[in-house]
Image (tube, rainbow, N blue to C red):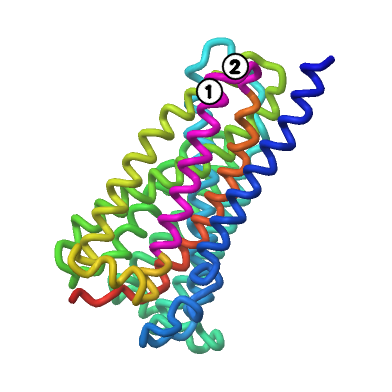
Amino acid sequence: MNAAASGRHARPSGTRRTVAVLVLVALGALIPVLGPSPALRGTGEAEAPGTGGIALLRTVLYAALSVPLGELFVNRLARSLPGAPPDRPRSWSPYAAAAGLVAALGLASVVATGNLMPGSVADIDVGGLYESRDGRLALLEVNGFLAAWLCATSRRPGLQVWPLAAVVVADALRAHPATEYGPLLGSALTLVHLTCACLWAGGLLYALRMLRRWRGAQAGPALLGLYARVAAVLLAALTATGVCSALRRMPAGTLLDQLTDTAYGRVLLAKVLLVAAVAVLALWARVRLSRAADPLTACSPARAEVVALGVVVAVSGLLTALPVPIRW
């Protein structure tokens, strides 16, 4: 009876600690996350028209990539577990692909109006998309999400991995124009970074949904442990590619100044703080998974980790919409 009472008291305490961590991190990243205007304040940089709308569209696009890739990833992990229940949560992939298609169409319309938010349909030059590199990449993303939706609603949903991969490649190429120094290296770093981020965020979301479906099954803690081991590798790859990408855009000699004096640097700093908090929550979940009497108590920090990862996705969307700092 005493053990049960102590378990009841421990759970709220753990929840309070999780909420406290998230609130502190959110306060630290509040100014950049509010949008481009606060991040640009005092930097001397002008806000491009439609930056907020583009940031929102990119956030939706990244979330739409994370959900289906995470489902495919965790389903593959579950198939490797002996005795895993055949039950699976309802797939959100069709809804994610539909949302991604809308976001990709919105971003394509921005490209078709000279990288400005269109005021009306008459402003959109659809034919012009075929004449520029950015336009062709935007069309590839639209077609990729359309193909992913068709695959997700078919009898072989696993095929959606190919059009989703095409979208990831297109977005990595889009982030690094041909005029940039070493664009292929930059695209390769972004490709790895974006893939790992989608697998980490989408995979954890689906793993928690699967654990809820498998309530009481022995395979539940095993699945979470297997995901945690792979997530550690994903975090290492994310960190390495993120640092390399930051140093390519902000040389080491100017890094500290640009982190505080440019909008891009401020939002990047906010993202770093959020990812550090996510790493702490992931470590906390792993410690609970390996040492707690009930391994499923790890779900509490893992749920907070999902929320924090959602904020990271939103910050990443904002980051891609801001002007890249000038190399000093």
**Earlier residue among tags 2 and 1:** 1
| Disc sitting over residue 168 in the figure | none
Quadrant for residue 185, please give it: bottom left
Name the residue rendered at 55%, 19% in the picture: 291
Q: Specify the amino acid type for callout 2.
A: Ala
Span of residues in magenta: 268-295
Query: Count of labels shown?
Result: 2
| Disc sitting over residue 78 in the figure | 1
| Residue 271: x %, y % from top left | 44, 58
SS type, badge 2? helix
Name the residue rendered at 71%, 17% in the picture: 216
Asked if residue 229 is among those painted magenta in the image, a careful observer would answer no
SS type, badge 1? helix
Q: Which residue is mark 2?
A: 219
Q: Specify the amino acid type for callout 1.
A: Ala
Left or right: 45 as drawn, with respect to 277: left
The extreme top residue here reads 83
| Residue 142: x %, y % from top left | 46, 62
Q: Do tag 2 and tag 1 residues touch (Cβ < 8 Å)? A: yes
Quadrant for residue 269, please give it: bottom left
Q: Residues within 10 Å of mark 2 (few under 14, many from 20)?
A: some
